[in-house]
Each structure stands twice: as C-alpha cells, then as structure tokens.
Image (spheres, rainbow, N blue to C red):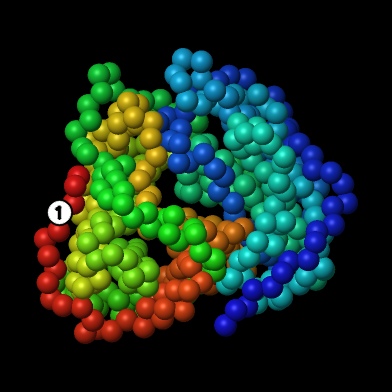
Amino acid sequence: MNNSIEIPDCYYPKEAVLICPSTSTPKHTLYLSNLDDQKFLRFSIKYLHLYKKSVSVDVLQASLSNVLVEYYPLAGRLKPSQEHEDKFLLDCNAQGAYFSEAHLDITVDQFLYASSKPNKSWRKLLFRLDSQSFLDVPPLIIQVNYLSCGGMILCTSINHCFCDGIGSSQFLHAWSQLTSKPNAELSVKPYHIRHLLKPRIPSQISFSHPEFHCHDPSFNVTQFILSQPLVPVSVTFTPSQILSLKKLCVPSLKCTSFEVLSSHVWRSWVKALDLPPFLPVKLIFSINVRKKMRPKLPIGYYGNGFVLGCAETSVDRLALSNLQYSVKLVQQAKDCVTDDYVRSMIDFLQERRIKPDLSSSLVISQWAKQELEDLDFGEGKPLYIGPVASEIYCLFLPVTGNLHAFTVLMSVPQSIAEKFEHLLVNFDEKEGNEDDGKEKLFV
C-alpha cells in the first residue's frame, strides 16, 4: 500500500537568518582527520523529526545560539588546505548556522500516515541554499516547519565532514537540552580536537581495505539501479521478527540484531535484483571505533569516529547459502576492525584519497541506537524520526516507542520493489542449505 502524499508548499514569513554563537568563541583553523575528510563524506546528513507540539521559533533560535558557543565549529565554514591538495580544513569563524521558519497546511496525523514512504516533495521541508560548490554550503542548516494542527517538523542538515551519526546526535541532544533547560550544564561536553586520528609517518598500511577495491568492473549494480525509476520500500521489523531471524542461526551461531538484519536485507536485495550469479557483491556498513582505539577516543568526540566494515562474496554463494553464512561474513568484517586496522585505514587515506567502490555494494547506515528518537525540545519526544529523502543506500531507523524494533528504508527499482518487500517480510526457517562455506574476507 502506498501511503505517500505530496507535501503542500511552505509559506515563509521571513527570509532565512544566520544564527551565530551568543558569545565570542575561539577563532582558529581546526584540523580534519582523514576519517572526516573522505571524499565520499562530502554531503550533509539530513534528519527529520515530527513533533505533536511545537516550540516557538524564538526559543529554538535562542537555544541554538547558546549551544553554538559549545559547538562553535558548526558555526564555521570549510576551506581548502594550502598544504595538502584536495583536503579541507575547518575555519572556526563564527559565521553562523542558517535557520529558516516555514508554515504549511498539513497535520501531524496526515504526515504520520505518509511517513513510511518519503517522496521528493519532502525536500521542501529543509531550506536549500543556492551554492556553487560543497565548500559554500554551511555545515549546519535548520528549518522548523509549523503545522496547521500545532505540531512541528524539525529538519536539520549537518555536514558529514564535521561529524558522524553519533556526533550529530550528540549535538542535537545538546541543543534540545539547552532548549528545554536553558541554564543547564551539558551532560556531554564536545571534544573538538581531531589530531588523535592523524596519519603516521611513515605510513604503515597493513590491511588491504576491501571496500576500496573493484573486482568486476564489467557490471555496475549501482548504475543498473539508477538507470530505472526508483520507489521507496519501508519495512518495520518487530522484536519478535528479529528473534525469528536469529533463530535461523542458533544454536551454532550467536549474533546481534544488526548482524542478522543486515545480512537478511543484503540477501533479499541480491535476490530481488536477480544479478549475475558469479558477480562479486559487498555489504558496506559503518563501525564505531571510539572504543576500539588505543587509547579510546575521549567522551564527547563528535568527529567521524567510524570506519567501513566490508563483507563480500559472490551472488550465487550469498543467495544459495543459509543466513548463517552471510551473518558470519558480517561478523568477520566487524572482528577485523582493531586499533591497527583503523590506523592503517587513516594511513591508506593519506596516500590514496579515493572513494569506496560502490559499484556492486549495498550500503547500510545505522540510525537506530543513536537515541535520535529521544530528542525532546521540551514538548515531548518525536512521533517519527527519519530522513528527508529515501536513497538507494539502506537506513536502519529507530521506531518510536519500541526500542528493539527497526524500520528498514531504502529505494529500489520499481520493477523489483514488490519482490524485495516480499523477501524481507517472508523468510522461511528451512530456506537455503547447510553449506556455510568458508568464504574468504580480503582483510
């Protein structure tokens, strides 16, 4: 059933404004680590939060100005490095974040009905600045949309070079905390310095980092997908359904909810696309390394503190083997990430400033478990949390009111959407064979 509806045009009572820190902040240039400054992170993470009750624009702007004192780099701008070609630095110049106020004739209930299927009309919920290049886009853009029923949709755009999902959530929680309790001390203080993740001299690249390698350039899955009309597919997995998936692996293999669900989505995606059987395919996902580093990264580190995990096999092995097989591939990809692996990755990116190979890869981004669903600006937690648009990469979204449930959202070719959704929802405990093949992970 397609619940998608067109969002009506927004009314803007005034032009977008720049919100600067409420007091003076340090003026300096901040180093971005090689994990921050990767070419494939040169975009903004766009969040959408739906609330039953609204908070006034004056209150939101005042608290944003206050939180930007603590998170002053987000009021700065990116600039090119003069020492290293194709590398960015962060100019902490207090130029400010863009803030836009909009009103539209739609209710919370109407939006909730449509929330499982984002469409292009949702993009109008976030202010878009005309810019000539990525460097011209402010790191923080916010639009608060006031609804006819008294609710609000809060959309935020945060430059991925500044912070990852965990860092973005940390900032958003700090902002919400100073909105609901203006005089409170932040529960987590931001840690700004990125030099902890500097490359070594000389470089010591001791792993192959398979996410950057293209094994079969003859067939590009991503181009194949993008050449067709796309539609969003959204499926919510309850705790009982996730438990049923785990039962396909026990007692011989214990696994986490992420491991089993990502494996299930990967297999379903490959089967639905009906790809050439001997084509190498990858599953790429982020792994938080804050606690894997030696020493651990400081509490409050909001820069990019992740590397990409990469499981890979062939289409026929993935489709014909049982779920245990793909879960083991995911676990092996996770287990290889150590302090040595991360530092090898940082050194690799110093010498080869390239993007991961996404030609035959499913990319999964984990938005659940980041407490985005707990973001309370003083009038209650959100009724819905998700992206402003659905893309061909897969999101694991939190489900409000159900900590252990996940919503899987991604766009696929319209021609396979029904088959893909069927494979996600209908999994058979007798599916596959018992060959859990010892597929090699190139790590």
Q: Quadrant of residue 348?
A: top left
For the C terminus, the image quarter is top left
Relative to 86, is 217 on the left or the right? left
The residue positioned 42% from the left and 55% from the top of the image is: 222
Seen at 60% across and 79% down, the residue is 2
Is 186 displayed left or right of 433 in the figure? right
Q: Quadrant of residue 426?
A: bottom left
Residue 94: tell me if it is visible: yes
Q: Residue furthest top?
A: 83
Vertical side of 149 occupied by 336: above or below? above
Query: SS of the residue at dot 1?
Result: loop
- Image coordinates of residue 368 in percent, x first then y, are 46, 61
Residue in front for this viewpoint, 44 or 85: 85
Quadrant the N terminus occupies: bottom right
442, above or below 36, in the image: below
Foreground of the two, 238 or 43: 43
Q: Residues within 10 Å of mark 1 (few under 14, many from 20)?
A: few
Residue at the extreme right:
13
Q: Is residue 58 left or right of residue 431?
A: right
Q: Which image quadrant is residue 347 in? A: top left
Nearer the observer, 265 or 147: 265
Image position, residue 333 (x, y; %): 24, 52
| As drawn, 438 above or below 42 | below
**Which residue in the protein does label 1 denote?**
440
Tag 1: amino acid:
Lys
Number of numbered labels in the structure image: 1
Q: Residue at x 19, y 72 (%)?
A: 321
- Residue 307 % position (x, y): 35, 43
Q: Residue at x 22, y 51 (%)?
A: 335
Measured as percent of width and height from the top left, residue 104 is found at 81, 63
Relative to 64, say whether 346 is above or below. above
Q: Is residue 379 visible?
A: no
